[in-house]
Image (cartoon, rainbow, N blue to C red):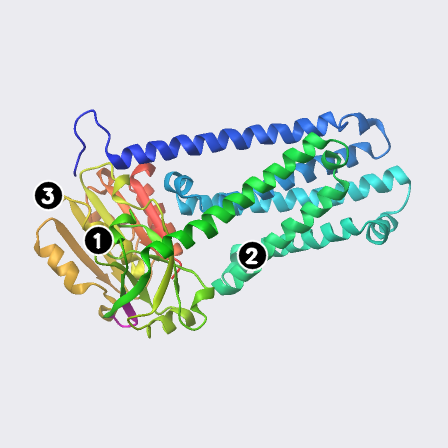
Amino acid sequence: MANAPTGQPSRAERAKGRARSRAWDVGVVLAANAVVVVGLWVRHGGLDQLSAPGGWLTAGGQLTGLVGTYAVLIEVLLMSRIAWLERYVGFDRLAVWHRWTGFSSVLLLVGHAVLITLGYAASSHVSIPNQIGDFVLHYPDVLMSIVGLALFITIAVVSVRAARRRLSREAWYSVHLYAYLAVALSFAHQLAVGTDFSSDRLARAWWIALYVAVFGAIAAWRLGRPLWFNARHRLRIHAVRREADGVISLYIAGRRLDRIQAEAGQFFLWRFLTGTGWAKAYPFSLSAPPNKQFLRVTIKALGDDTRAMQRLQPGVRVFAEGPYGTFTATRRTRRRVALIAGGIGITPLRALLQTLPGKPGDITLLYRVASDADVAFGQELTALAQQGHVDVRVLVGADIGDDHTDRLGIPALRGLVPDIADRDVFVCGPPAMVDAVRRRLRALHVPARQIHFERFSY
């Protein structure tokens, strides 16, 4: 393993340190603003109404509405693709935080709607249906907020794993775009009747600044940076190579590729500008270390879109966003490493193999495939094995057993890599396979800090 001079951190370590510092700063800012949200509610008489009829319900509704709205802004910010934040936290972890913040914000906003309705009904001494009718007929901004809440609930429902598995990625993504409309409707409602807006100019300016900051980050990192990146590098497909049944590698050329600063193991969001390809972005990992000549991605036909990509030809323009991901050699902490791939999950591990130097016996690759025809990079893996420092084990078989009978089960892992608890382990494959292998590694007493994983979507 390559080491920096004694006492001198490497460039990657310095960059990660800067990203960690910035991420900590963001956490402090978010926490401080959460305190301000509650403080403004108290300042505007939130506690004073508790003794009035239905006052505690109304107060609870106001507080859940304010905190829920703030949670929505955090949820959106987490997926704004701020490069330095993603570099430290990791795209996968940010996505998990985004998901749970989203569910939390929806629960808070539902609580806001229920508590406000009950509180107003109690204070006005009317029935709940009459109070709802009054909101709908006499408060247009409330009607907008109801539509916005319905959109948030719909997005939350399709994000539940059981529903997510039934939807194509394109349909799921299209539904999520309505989150921006829901935010706009909620903001209009907040402007019209929110206590922080109607009676305090300073609070109004503060909330507007929050919205501007969040959507400014989206404009800069999800629109501005990709446009600049692609104008600079002008990517095109240079060559297409068949790797296995239904698997191709795209060699993507462009200008100044050495300036991209991507690492083996990272991924980009790719759009292939042919037909309607411009409208859909796909997360594909680099399957070879980046160099001055090309970036390589490898795609397996797993659905309609990825089957269509098998027909891509040289010359097609490519629009890319990235690089993203922390599944790189910088996470290595031990001299010996085990890499475990399932199917097309071999792609980032194939790239990593060239950036993990070691002595004979230091690097072991376990590559699980359904059949011999599914083996990708066969010649490349053979060449790496012949060089002496990589032990390649291809595990063929379509059947999947439990923790004890599977080819990547606990006894199998113990037999294939007896010292696995003393190694860093990089795992990539389908979500179910990755989760099962992680569980088995913990049963084999591999410390969590030595387990590095990435689930693939395609």
Q: In what element is the residue under mark 2?
A: helix
Q: Which residues are magenta?
A: 244-249
- Judged by its main secondary structure, the magenta piece is strand
Q: Position of residue 4 (x, y in %)?
A: 18, 32
* Residue at x 72%, y 34% (from the top left corner): 196
- According to the picture, the residue beneath numbered tag 3 turns out to be 359
- In the image, is 13 to the left or to the right of 228? left
Q: How far apart are the two marked residues, 2 and 3, measured between alpha carbons?
A: 48 Å
**What quarter of the picture does the N terminus occupy?**
top left
Residue 373 appears anywhere in the view: yes
Relative to the observer, which residue lies in front, 129 or 80? Answer: 80
Residue 433 appears anywhere in the view: no
* Residue at x 18%, y 64% (from the top left corner): 378
Q: How far apart are the two marked residues, 2 and 1, measured between alpha carbons?
A: 35 Å
Picture layout, residue 74 above or below residue 341: above
Q: In the rendered structure, are the residues bearing label 1 and label 3 in contact, judged by CB atoms less than 8 Å apart?
A: no
Q: How far apart are the two marked residues, 1 and 3, measured between alpha carbons?
A: 24 Å
Which three-letter amino acid code belongs to the residue tagged 2?
Answer: His
Of circles 1 and 3, the one toward us is 1
Picture layout, residue 399 above or below residue 142: below
Picture layout, residue 21 above or below residue 446: above
Of circles 2 and 3, the one toward us is 2
Which three-letter amino acid code belongs to the residue tagged 1?
Answer: Asn
Mark earlier in primary sequence (2, 1): 2
Q: Position of residue 439 (x, y in %)?
A: 36, 46
Q: In the image, which disc is placed on residue 291? A: 1
- According to the picture, the residue beneath numbered tag 2 turns out to be 176
